[in-house]
Image: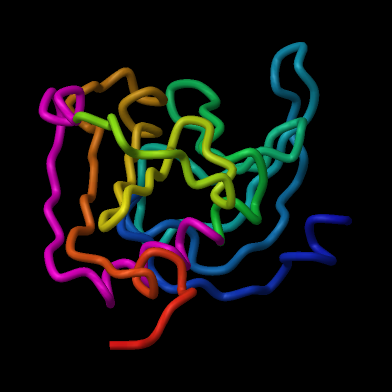
Amino acid sequence: MAFHESWGGIALPPAPAYEGGPRVLEADVPERLGTDGWYFGAGDGRVSMAYGFMIGPGGEFGIDADHWTPLHAGTQGWVEALALAYHAAYWARTITKIRGEAVEQLDLDGFEPVPEVQGLTDTWWRSKDSLIAIYSGEAVGLDAPHRREAHIYGGLDAWGLGGTGPAH
């Protein structure tokens, strides 16, 4: 009920990962998650997929693939990450996408986590002029390391990093 009151019926733009994510946030019938509690569907995906979007027993937003994989500590984290992806893509001078083992080679020295996204398996990182989104949910949930992906948004100023400066 609480999820539906806060998020039910909200239509989302396509996510940059996860085949676009759910189209509309909506609660489904609760299911038992082992001995950890209950979880429920968070909305249908935009395409037929090997997993579904779920809300976990602690309110986490994630995917139910080969096993439950929480992406963000809450639905607000998913929505914040989606908003940040659109903001960063608009303001970045460059966008670089890498996959698989190349993601492991990313040097995050000088970067700090972006707490607003409530990242668990998926995380966002900020530096003085860049943002990095690391999408690990499919890699973990499907036991497929080659599906790990990072999007590097470069050439950002204060406005592009957080919306707290003058517009271009």
For residue 25, which quarter of the picture? Answer: bottom right
- Tell me the quarter of the image containing the N terminus: bottom right
In the depicted view, which residue is nearer to us: 54 or 31?
54
Q: Residue at x 77, y 11 (%)?
A: 35
Q: Residue at x 76, y 32 (%)?
A: 58
For residue 50, which quarter of the picture? Answer: top left
Q: Residue at x 37, y 69 (%)?
A: 158
Relative to 158, residue 150 above or below: above
Position in image of residue 12 (x %, y %): 51, 72
Relative to 107, residue 61 above or below: below
Locate residue 122 relative to residue 129 in the image: left or right.
right
The question of residue 85 being in magenta is answered with yes
Locate residue 36 relative to residue 126 in the image: left or right.
right
For residue 111, which quarter of the picture? Answer: top left
- Tell me the quarter of the image containing the C terminus: bottom left
In the depicted view, which residue is nearer to us: 87 or 36?
87
Q: Residue at x 51, y 28 (%)?
A: 69
Part of the protein shown in magenta: 80-106
- State the residue lying farthest toward the top: 35
Position in image of residue 33 (x %, y %): 70, 22
Position in image of residue 157 (x %, y %): 29, 69
Q: How many marks?
A: 0
The question of residue 41 being in magenta is answered with no
